[in-house]
Image (cartoon, helix red, strand yellow):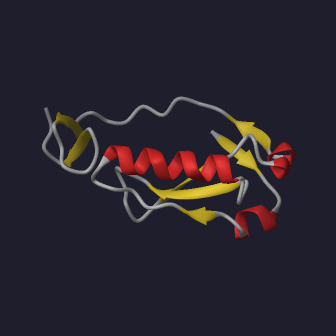
Amino acid sequence: MEIEVAPELLAQAEALALSSDIAVTQAAGNDWLRSKKSALATVPSLPSPKSKNYLLNPTHPEARGAKMIESSWIEYDQRIFKVVAGGNRLPFHLELGKGK
């Protein structure tokens, strides 16, 4: 999904860290939502940790100004990513380059 937001919202985005403990990660996200500290938060992208994903807090008053530009399904090439149960970062992890 692509959204458009005011530049100041992007500059004020709060960085949230991921934990190997899913409960800790969920609690951090829930705390951020409840606090309404910022309309946006950033989290590392799981398949590409040097990239960021942005989360929009719909309960933040300034989130009303966000405008959806595009929404589309992205299908990842399964030859590149293989989901393996029981990973150590989250309930799953991705192994790069292993194929099927």
Q: Is residue 8 left or right of residue 92?
A: right
Residue 85 at what x, y percent from top left?
Answer: 17, 33
Name the residue rendered at 60%, 53% in the picture.
Answer: 32
* Callout count: 0
Residue 86 at what x, y percent from top left?
Answer: 16, 38
Closest to the observer, 66 or 21: 21
Name the residue rendered at 26%, 33% in the picture.
Answer: 78
Closest to the observer, 88 or 7: 88
Residue 19 at what x, y percent from top left?
Answer: 34, 56
Q: Quadrant of the C terminus?
A: top left
Residue 88 at what x, y percent from top left?
Answer: 18, 49
The answer to whether residue 80 is seen in the rendering is: no
Q: Give the vertical position of 71 relative to 21 (above or below).
A: above
Please tell me in which quadrant of the rendered image residue 48 appears: bottom left
Closest to the observer, 66 or 96: 66
Q: Give the vertical position of 24 relative to 12 (above or below).
A: above
The answer to whether residue 77 is seen in the rendering is: yes
Q: Is residue 34 left or right of residue 52?
A: right
Name the residue rendered at 71%, 60% in the picture.
Answer: 37
Q: Quadrant of the N terminus?
A: top right
Name the residue rendered at 80%, 47% in the picture.
Answer: 63
Q: Is residue 34 left or right of residue 29?
A: right
Please tell me in which quadrant of the rendered image residue 67 appears: top right
Q: Give the vertical position of 37 relative to 94 (above or below).
A: below
